[in-house]
Image: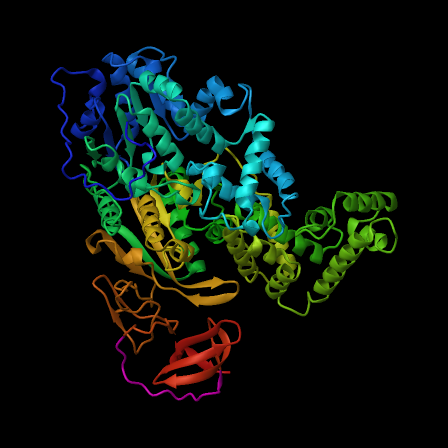
Amino acid sequence: MSDPFELSEDVHDLSDMPDLIAVPTQPLPYLDGLNDEQTRAVMALDGPVLVLAGAGTGKTRVLTTRLAHILVEGKARPWEILAVTFTNKAAREMQSRVAIITGRPVEGWWLGTFHALCARILRRHAELVGLKHNFTILDTDDQLRLLKQLMEPLEIDEKKWPARVLMGVIQRWKDRGLTPEKILNEEGSDIAEGVLSELYRDYQIRLKTLNAVDFGDLLLHCLTLFTENIDVLHEYQIKFRYLLVDEYQDTNVAQYLWLRLLVQEHKNICCVGDDDQSIYSWRGAEVGNILKFGKDFLEATVIRLEQNYRSTPDILAAASGLISHNEGRLGKTLWTGMNGGDPVKVHAVWDGEAEARLVGDEIEVRQSRGQSLEEMAILVRAGFQMREFEERMINLGVPYRVIGGPRFYERHETRDAIAYLRVVNSPDDDLAFERIINVPKRGLGQATVQAIHQLARAQSMPMYEAARLIIQTDEIKPKARSSLSGLLQDFQRWRSNIDVLPHFELAEIILDESGYTEMWMRDKSPEAPGRLENLKELVSGLEDFDNLQGFLEHVSLVMENQENKTEDKISLMTLHAAKGLEFETVFLPGWEEGLFPHQRSLDEEGLSGLEEERRLAYVGITRAKKEAMIFYAANRRIYNQWQNSLPSRFVNELPAENIEVISEQGLNSGIGVKFGNGSLDAGFDVISDTLSYESPQKRGHTSEGTIIEAEEWTVSASPSNSTFEVGIRVFHQKFGYGKILSLDGNKLEVEFEKAGTKKVIDSFVDPA
């Protein structure tokens, strides 16, 4: 048996593999309605099979029909089939569908998630890995509590290395099949003062003492069980005559190794997946598992499901043209037998507010035509983008739901920030005060809070007033008294500035001086960058209101917007949460460089990060059945600073013949911007009446006069002599007041008081 732990790095060429499976001559009722490729995928029962199933190509039907066909043909009994799904819901649906096809309930088979199947095996052989059969599976809270206990003897500073960050590294090791003994110079072994590998070892020892495992252990212990007990491994290799794996592109290394071990006897493994939809590397998924299937199984049959039953021809062509720019893929081209449909709309708008307004208008137009809100979705790259769309839906009275997470104002970090603002606005707000009294941690534990509560009840006063009294006594410890006194002084200082500083600037100061922003900056968890983006978006949103009181009243009204489960609603979610879903109309906002592809992915992962971002764009477009609408803005307001934006490189990778570019009046489309080693050969958020831009799709002029800053960007201009001089104070309708730094013909470089340094056209500013 070949070494199952040998991970090949290269991608095997699949072009010479057999991909023709005989279609049955005798009709089988359950094959009715399947196309040729689907039928071949069902009938290819012998040997390793890779089914490359593109978006909307009917892979669920293929999976269930294949399982039913194995049973009907007598190739295996239910308990001789191992079928792996990624959710328990998918497993239940598959079992139900197979029962319908076969005409009888299917019992005794091994169908479920990796974790569920591994837990089932471990229950039978727990003693062989140092456990008892009734072991406990710990949840996240219990894992973190246990890890914190073990961090103390090793003197790991939890403020510098939060437990959830260290647990994240340990779980990634487990995803890669690495036990503590195998952690040498692995990535992450040098963090936490270089003792993380020791902490990992102590954690595993403690788990066994408690007769407990975490989710990562379910696979890790199974790997240990199989590699150290060949007789047990051989039992399961003989037992499972057929293996079937769904969403193979999302498997991690440990799952890959587990499957490799089990399949060595019969070699009858069928993996179904789409390399173009691998978007979960941040949680351990390895797209390389599906890319090197042909290297792992040289005799593999590869079947491509390319006929799409979901989307219109233009949507499929646009998505296929985009994903073709990825190098790390096996290759397939989606097509459809449907006719008609509109090209993908690409909208260039002035800013995020205009983007949300236009999406809202498009939604109302479709509502007026009778289209259900349930058939529409807004898919964003980052969670912070949701705020403006939520605000717009509320203003329009359009019911909405957020899929895969809480609404913007219900998020943990947003609630904390608003709690600070509520206390500044109203010291009597006990709920807000209690929420943030020790956030970030400032040594005010439960005993201190309880003492304040007792005094407040006894004196019938708000907690804030009770806190002011208690710091004058010895009721709480000196350290806590000093910390509480400092917090109250901070609130007094912030409150004194309500009428002095703009409320959005005050909010930024509060979050900085309280240490709340720094808390998330120091946090190394994967969620921390998104939380910081949400805080920035919250501060930006404050500028839309006249004062702090008006903002807080608005938030209260939003929070009172009760969820009606039966009401028709539009769906709002991130692109990651949208995988597997489909809608008649899909809105895709924020296609700008730095936002999508996200700059963090480019900085941390380089080319592989870019390709995953492109796969994410592909997933977004292919969610649409009839309409896909992409939006990008010339400007984004981030942390109260206006920033120029370039259209995403993905916009320019869309085939021109399958898209329609629509720009706001006076705004250029930006099509033609080059990236990589190329140059910027067209303008974006340009220009004025004296500057023009030509693209194959649209010609336009802007009314705002902003010029993007790019060294290699070229644009033709009509000669013009400015009447302004360096040093003159000017006013711009969008950017406010500023001072001219330099002149170049009719182009001015102006340092604006709030928006920073911008290049504008002189005809769009006035002397101040």
Residue 757 percent location from the top left of the image: 46, 75
Report the magenta residues as a range: 715-729
| Magenta run includes residue 646 | no
Q: Measured from the top left, where is residue 243 in percent x and y?
A: 31, 23
Q: Position of residue 167 (x, y in %)?
A: 54, 41
Q: Quadrant of residue 28?
A: top left
Spot occupied by residue 464 in the image (x, y as percentages of width and height): 78, 52
**Residue 566 visible in rendering:** no
Which residue is found at the position 85% from the left and 54% from the top? 469
Nearer-the-camera pick, 251 or 306 = 251
Decide whether residue 717 is among the magenta residues. Answer: yes
Q: How many marks?
A: 0
The reply, left or right, for residue 476 in relation to residue 251 is right
Compared to residue 194, the image places residue 250 above or below, namely above
Q: Is residue 346 above or below residue 217?
A: below
Magenta span main SS:
loop
Q: Is residue 286 left or right of residue 18?
A: right
What colour scheme was applied to this rendering of the protein? rainbow
Q: Quadrant of the N terminus?
A: top left
